[in-house]
Amino acid sequence: MSSFFRPNLRRSGRIARGVAGALCLMFGIIWVDVSMLKGLIVIAAGLVALAEAITGWCLVRACGSRIKI
């Protein structure tokens, strides 16, 4: 189980997730004015992406997907 939580992102993947997370947060904050539920979902996705960027661990990659990032 400990190998599941081992960092699995390189620098480029961390940067990509950080940028995606920041963009999701910005769009989510704007979108909350239009639709509260959709805005909160986008904000949650942004927070998850930022957490992945900070920790260097991606849930999708830990489950076995080998994305080229």
Image (cartoon, helix red, strand yellow):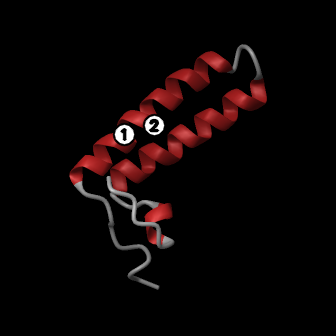
Q: Is residue 3 above or below residue 26?
A: below
Q: Residue at x 34, y 41 (%)?
A: 16
| Farthest residue, direction bottom | 1
Asked where in the image residue 21 lies, by quadrant, the reply is: top left
Q: Is 7 rendered above or below residue 53?
A: below
Mark 1 belongs to which amino acid? Gly
| Quadrant hosting residue 8 | bottom left
Residue 52: x and y in percent read 42, 53
Relative placement, left or right, of 66 versus 15 is right
Residue drawn 43% across and 36% down? 20
Name the element at disc 1. Answer: helix
Q: Residue 64 — which label?
A: none
Horizontal relation, residue 21 to residue 31: left or right: left
The residue carrying pointer 2 sits among few (fewer than 14), some (14 to 19) or many (20 or more) residues within 10 Å by Cα, namely many
What element does badge 2 sit on?
A: helix
Residue 32 x %, y % = 69, 20
Reading the image, the residue beneath label 2 is: 21
Q: Residues within 10 Å of mark 1 (few under 14, many from 20)?
A: many
Residue for point 42% across, 73% down: 5
Q: Nearer the viewer, residue 12 or 47?
A: 12
**Image point (52%, 42%), residue name:** 47
Instruction: Please say if the residues under marks 1 and 2 sit with CB atoms less than 8 Å apart.
Output: yes
Query: Marks 1 and 2, Cα distance to the nearest angstrom?
Result: 5 Å
Q: Which residue type does callout 2 highlight?
A: Gly
Labels in figure, total = 2
Residue 13 image point, x, y percent: 31, 50
Q: Quadrant of residue 40?
A: top right
Q: Where does the image place residue 48, in percent across and percent down from the top left?
A: 52, 48
Location of mark 1 (residue):
18
